[in-house]
Image: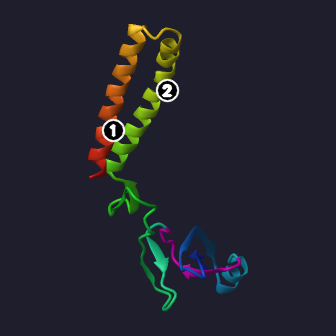
Amino acid sequence: MSAITWSFFYLQTGLLTGRTYSAPDLETIEANTPLGCGAVTGAHDHKRFRVDLENGAIVEYQPPSPGFGYEWDGETRAWVRTAAALKGEAARGRIKYLEGRQARAVRELAINPANAIARETLTSIDSEIEGERQKMKEAAV
């Protein structure tokens, strides 16, 4: 007798667990099905399908969005960050880096308020931060 491949799913949601099991008969699969789960014949992609609890059919599945700044990619069947969200994240990272660079210039100005190099450094950093803030505004549109 040849083995049949089974996919496990959660009885409460119908979501596939991602685990499969090959068994030659129904009794073997029943003994090896995890608690709170059911089994359906076939090896099914848990990111793409789920079990319809009303009729036991395998149906297409799109998980809920993880949050703002994501879009569904039908080809990869996954949520991906939008270009705007990535641009905003890059700008925030750059701002954090630039703000970290300010400490040295601020210390030098505290010691010597007439320090022109420290003042130029702060002005340059502030200008860069303003440019990054503008990128964040554009990304939010």
Q: Nearer the viewer, residue 27 or 79?
A: 79
Q: Which element carries disc 1, helix, strand or loop?
A: helix
Q: Nearer the viewer, residue 101 or 74?
A: 101
> Which quadrant of the figure has residue 4?
bottom right
Q: CA distance from mark 1 to mark 2?
A: 16 Å
Comes first in the chain, label 1 or label 2 = 2
> Which quadrant of the figure has residue 89?
top left
Q: Which residue is rendered at x = 67% and y = 80% of the image? A: 36
Magenta span contains residue 119: no
Disc 2 packing (10 Å; few <14; some 14–19; many ≥20):
few
The residues colored magenta run: 35-46
Q: Which residue is mark 1?
A: 133
Residue at the far front in the pictured view: 113
- In the rendered image, residue 113, in percent from the top left (x then y), is placed at 46, 11
Q: Which element carries disc 2, helix, strand or loop?
A: helix
- In the rendered image, residue 107, in percent from the top left (x then y), is placed at 53, 16
- The kind of residue on which mark 2 rests is Gly
Magenta span contains residue 45: yes
> Which quadrant of the figure has residue 87?
top left
Tell me, for residue 100, which label it has, or none.
2
- In the rendered image, residue 86, in percent from the top left (x then y), is placed at 36, 45
Whether residue 130 is situated above or below residue 67 in the rendered picture: above
